[in-house]
Image: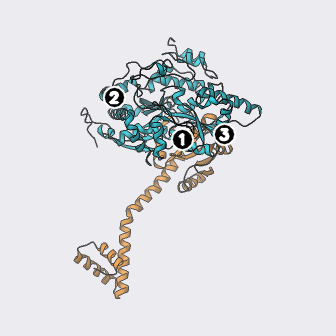
Chain colours: A cyan, B orange
Amino acid sequence: MGTINNRNGLQLEKPDVTLGFIPLTDCAPLVIAQEKGYFAGEGLNVTLSREASWAGIRDKVGLGILDGAQMLASIPVASRLGVGGPKIDMVSAMVLDLNGNAITINNQLYKHLYEIDSRCEFSPLIAAQALQCLIEENKRSKRPKLRFGVVYPCSTQSYELRYWLASAGIDPDRDIEIVVIPPPKMVTAMTDGDIHGFCVGEPWNTLAVQQQIGHVVATKYQLWNNSPEKVFAVSESWSKENPLTHQAMLRALIKACIWLDKKENRRATAKIISQAAYIALPEETVALSLTGSSLKHHGLPAEKVEDFHVFHRYSANFPWLNHAEWFISQMYRWGQLTTPVNIEETVAAVYKPSLFRIAAAAVGIECPSIDRKTEGNLHEKMILTKSQHIGPNQFLDGQVISVGGIIKYLEKQNLSKADIPALRLINTRKEV
Amino acid sequence: MKVLLIDIDEHRAKKIDAIITWAGIELLSVTDSDADIYQLVGELHPEIILVDTNSPNRDTLEHLAQLQKGAPRTVINLGGNRSESINRLASEAGISLYAIDAVPTALLQSLIDIAISYFHSVNQLRAEVEALKPTTDARQSLNKAKKFIMDTYGLTEDQATDLLNKNADRQRKPVTDVARQLLDTGSFI
């Protein structure tokens, strides 16, 4: 016991830690930090624990059975507010990756949409509009509602699926049925005909297309360029009791993310994370999206999308407060959260840019000196190709969220259940 | 009061069954991973759900809790306090608890306490039995070897014991090793 942290000679409070992950392509930062010795290099003895559910991860971190874990970027925020589960005070000082999800629909549904408008093949907006036509037709003929699967009620995937549907005026709570299915069971559920579509992280979309049971109609990148997907989170009390251990973990994870973002390391990553102890799927399935190939339709070649998974570039690891604000806006929009809260205070309690900056300085990387940024104002074509610090950030519906303008943005969202006057009353900060 | 078990293996289910029946609570169903949780909970209306901590179905239970105000929801603290016993239920028995708001905290607390103590005592007993195993195994082979000597050479028990000890001395081995060797090969060498 009592390993010396070789960097500054300070003793880590808890060198032996257990960290949880879910078998998904973006468990890579934790796995690489372990397999490439970045954890060991920081004096950490890490046990990785493969978990079967997000609720399980959340509760185990809350109860102290896990020291920290990979989590959907929305979970620490939802838990702080007690939305969709018990109130657990968690903090996140680091984002593990951007993008990486997709919406897949089964062959039959895709055929229907393609018949309505063949541009569904490449346009998520048109696919959603075609789906809206089909849903109206189904209503008239009194056919049962279509069922879509997501992995957790307050998940990034749930908000992405809802965003896509709402872009065509489809009410996700009335016009379709949303069910929760764990990622590894998603493809089977589609094969069995239990669900018509799903929004899930890789490699499950690629697998569905490879098995020729479905088509990808939208990727997370298309819905909101370079939006946060998974974070590394610990409980607030744990972070206070183990500040040096927390920093050591962050340093190791940042180094793993830097390594992961190099193109030449992606094949090797696929080989490692596809193993039985991690994702347990064929290396070829995992490798596609990791190497920047977005497979959408069987029979058609994969599209080249270099940014399908982003682990480090575009300041990806920085926990932007405005990203947490966006999750809260969606909780209000869909009626998951009804009590008005001070959004600014809530996000500052959960996302910890200040902790990230310390780790970034120790690793020797640059990081933003502001905590919030504007979203939706940078198109792909505006980005200089060599730029690694900032990336495109467009939304599917072309909206822009200025700093401090989250309520104004929420007010413009259709189908919203948010009580804007009540929110304005409690969020007195001057809006931009 | 109705309790639903999800993804709890037969071994643990039996134990829980005993606890629950004893407490006068009705045990509804033991299901496996492939069951339709939406349908199950919708039809059975359990007040309490005990689920394997590592069950992939847990995220579906969370969704149900969000959809229906009256559905059981995760219990992570009792009466507003962080509960050590819930932690132990998860880490020692591998069980997570869901309950509707109307179930009194005191009842949940006793249910958890009984479950933990039961699992704890059974686990402890098993650990003690495991710890004793080498000793009992050794005694058993010693007794078998003595019986083998008595039957084969027509000696008394004392003589057989003496013979085993002497051979062990000469071979500089523990007497149990000599006994096992005798049983395996039928000879002292």
Question: Which residue in the structure is indicated by mark 3?
Answer: A108
- Earlier sequence position, callout 3 versus callout 1: 3
Quadrant (top left/top right/bottom left/bottom right) for the N terminus of chain A: top left
Q: Is residue A346 visible?
A: no
Instruction: Report helix, strand or loop for mark 3.
Output: helix
Residue A272, position as x, y percentages in the image: 40, 44
Q: Which mark is residue B2?
A: none
Residue A133, position as x, y percentages in the image: 70, 28
* Residue in the image at 68% along x and 28% along y: A132
Decide: few, some or many residues near mark 3? Use Cα within 10 Å; few <14, some 14-19, many ≥20: few
Decide: few, some or many residues near mark 1? Use Cα within 10 Å; few <14, some 14-19, many ≥20: many
Q: Are marks 3 and 2 in contact (CB under 8 Å)?
A: no
Q: Are dots 2 and 1 on a single chain?
A: yes
Question: Which residue in the structure is indicated by mark 1?
Answer: A183
Give the chain letter at badge 1: A
Q: Amino acid at mark 1?
A: Pro
Q: Amino acid at mark 3?
A: Gln
Q: Nearer the viewer, mark 2 or mark 1?
A: 1
- Pick the front one: A165 or B127: A165
Instruction: Report helix, strand or loop for mark 2.
Output: helix
Label 2 to label 1: alpha-carbon separation: 32 Å
Question: From the viewer's perspective, is residue A342 above or below residue B79?
Answer: above
Residue A156, position as x, y percentages in the image: 53, 31
Which residue, as the protein is rendered here, is positioned at the far bottom?
B154
Question: From the viewer's perspective, is residue A73 above or below residue B165?
Answer: above
Question: Which residue in the structure is indicated by mark 2?
Answer: A359
Instruction: Report helix, strand or loop for mark 1.
Output: helix
Q: Are dots 3 and 2 on a single chain?
A: yes
